Image (spheres, rainbow, N blue to C red):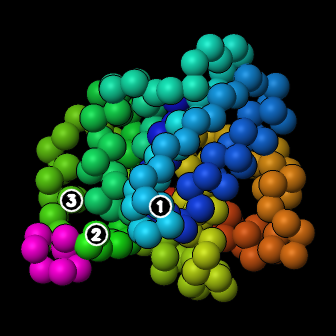
Amino acid sequence: MNILIVGVGGQGTILASKILGAYATLTNQDCKLSEIHGMSQRGGNVVTHVKMASKVYSPIIGYEEADMILAFELLEAKRAISFLKKGKTLLANTQKIYPISVASGVALYPNVIKELENSDYKKYYLDALEIAKASGNIKTVNVVMLGAMSYLLDFDQEKFICALKETIPSKYIEENLKAYQAGINALKENKE
């Protein structure tokens, strides 16, 4: 399973990859993680490669090698789409974080959903920011998305919850467990 996590600095992409790494360990899989971030502290993009299998030899996912793109921001989904295998899955948060060129009026934010409409991928979109707000903490967008992804990929939810508990500090675990379940529920509704 090759999962590319993309987002903007501060959205928790690296924490999400660590949670997936903990899950892989709990399910007796080898796992390799690799992260690439441009000016992430200033709202730049962050890309995290997660590979899980019985044996993983390289941490980097090449073009058209990802089984899933987990996008925490909509424009980052568009930027990463060339890494997705045909027929595989894009799970994207509909949140828009405007890059400097858009915020300054030099460029327009593209209609990403329309641009990806006719592509050969399975696509699921969630307003993870609103779901996180309703769950009690907007900083749990990443865990909302992980909940949706774990449901979509039929991950062992009990072991995934253990991975959350191993990775997230105990004082934040309850709000993250709530966000995780909200992500599962949102994707169930989305699929029906």
**68 to the left or right of 119:** right
Q: Which residue is depicted at the point 29% across and 41% down? A: 81
Give the number of the disc on residue 40: 1
Q: In the image shown, does 168 or 105 lie closer to the viewer? A: 105
Give the residues in magenta.
101-107
Q: For residue 4, say whether it is visible.
A: yes
The kind of residue tagged 3 is Val
- Asked if 65 appears above or below 7 in the picture, the reply is above
Q: Which residue is depicted at the point 59% across and 62% down? A: 12
Tag 2–tag 3 contact (CB < 8 Å) = no
- Asked if 8 appears above or below 105 in the picture, the reply is above
Give the number of the disc on residue 112: 3
- Asked if 133 appears above or below 84 in the picture, the reply is below
The kind of residue tagged 2 is Pro
- Mark 3, secondary structure of its residue: helix
What is the crowding at mark 1: few (fewer than 14 residues within 10 Å), some, or many (at least 20)?
A: some
The Cα–Cα distance between marks 1 and 3, rounded to whole angstroms, is 21 Å
Mark before the other along the chain sequence, 1 or 3: 1
Quarter containing the N terminus: top right
Give the number of the disc on residue 99: 2
- Asked if 167 appears above or below 88 in the picture, the reply is below
Q: Which residue is depicted at the point 42% across and 53% down? A: 38
Mark before the other along the chain sequence, 2 or 3: 2
Mark before the other along the chain sequence, 1 or 2: 1
The Cα–Cα distance between marks 2 and 3, rounded to whole angstroms, is 14 Å
Magenta stretch contains residue 103: yes
Q: Quadrant of residue 153?
A: top right
